[in-house]
Amino acid sequence: EEQLVQSGAEVKNPGESLKISCKGSGYSFSSYWIGWVRQMPGKGLEWVGLIYPADSDTRYSPSFEGQVTISADKSISTAYLQWSSLKASDTAIYYCTRHVTFDIWGQGTMVTVSS
Amino acid sequence: QSVLTQAPSVSGTPGQRVTISCSGISSNIGRKTVNWYQQLPGTAPKLLIYSTNQRPSGVPDRFSGSQSGTSASLAISGLQSGDEADYYCAAWDDRLNGPVFGGGTKLTVL
């Protein structure tokens, strides 16, 4: 079965760093772009960025450029989304999904940033 | 504010047919195909329609998609209570060089 499995929920203080993960299985992970999508509480879907695991080519939405870093380790079929200094406004569910049609989605990682 | 425009809500009664619209511009829907996603409460989005009118395996033919100019539509026929969900359209945007989403439409089955 083709699937993406994400790391568990996180509760962090403002200013802390965080790295969440997305592990693919059941398909050739390196051959498909992986996208990250944010969903703030009660809101819609927003594209964060894309990465091609085979060569780590990365694209960011202008809204998120400089705010997050996307990376991947193809040897373990895992993509990452990280923050160096979290803000309360980063509180959201973050999904990874397989590009181009976003046909497979991870279960989501809830990130809560609160003092 | 989302790049693609959707009505916030739509409703229908069981068995009825409803349509959800999605409006874009020339750099996205005007030149690219549209995908639709269904998000049931508390779950991750699920691909419902891709390439404007194609259904992934397992999606009932009650769901159909169409596109004209800079707009696209999702039609749901034979409405069921289990169809209550948020529906999102998405398309690639050549100016952004990335995907853009609609704000979502909440479907209520009365």
Image (cartoon, coloured by chain):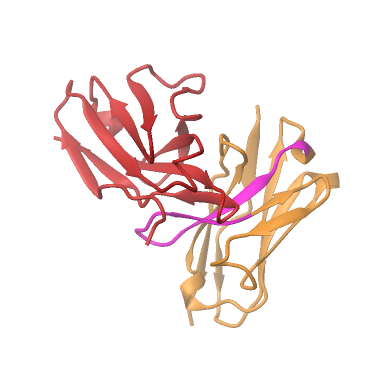
Chain colours: A orange, B red
Residue at the spot x=29%, y=30% of the render?
B82
For the C terminus of chain B, the image quarter is: top left
Q: Is residue B65 left or right of residue A18?
A: left
Q: Position of residue B51 (x, y in %)?
A: 50, 29
Within the image, what quadrant is residue A8 found in? bottom right
Q: Is residue A95 left or right of residue B89?
A: right
Q: Position of residue A93 (x, y in %)?
A: 49, 58
Would residue B44 be visible to someone looking at this image?
A: no
Which stretch did the figure color magenta?
A: A31-49
Queried whether the magenta region covers residue B18, the answer comes back as no
Q: Is residue B46 above or below residue A90?
A: above
Residue at the spot x=78%, y=47% of the render?
A53
Residue at the spot x=82%, y=46% of the render?
A74
**B79, A66: nearer the viewer:** A66
Q: Position of residue A68 (x, y in %)?
A: 64, 68
Q: Is residue B72 above or below residue A95?
A: above
User: Disc count in the image?
Assistant: 0
**B28, B54: nearer the viewer:** B28
Residue at the spot x=39%, y=43% of the render?
B88
Q: Is residue B10 left or right of residue B52?
A: left
Queried whether the magenta region covers residue A44, the answer comes back as yes
For the N terminus of chain B, the image quarter is: bottom left
Q: Residue furthest top?
A: B61
Would residue A98 be visible to someone looking at this image?
A: yes
Q: Position of residue B45 (x, y in %)?
A: 46, 41
Q: Residue furthest right?
A: A75
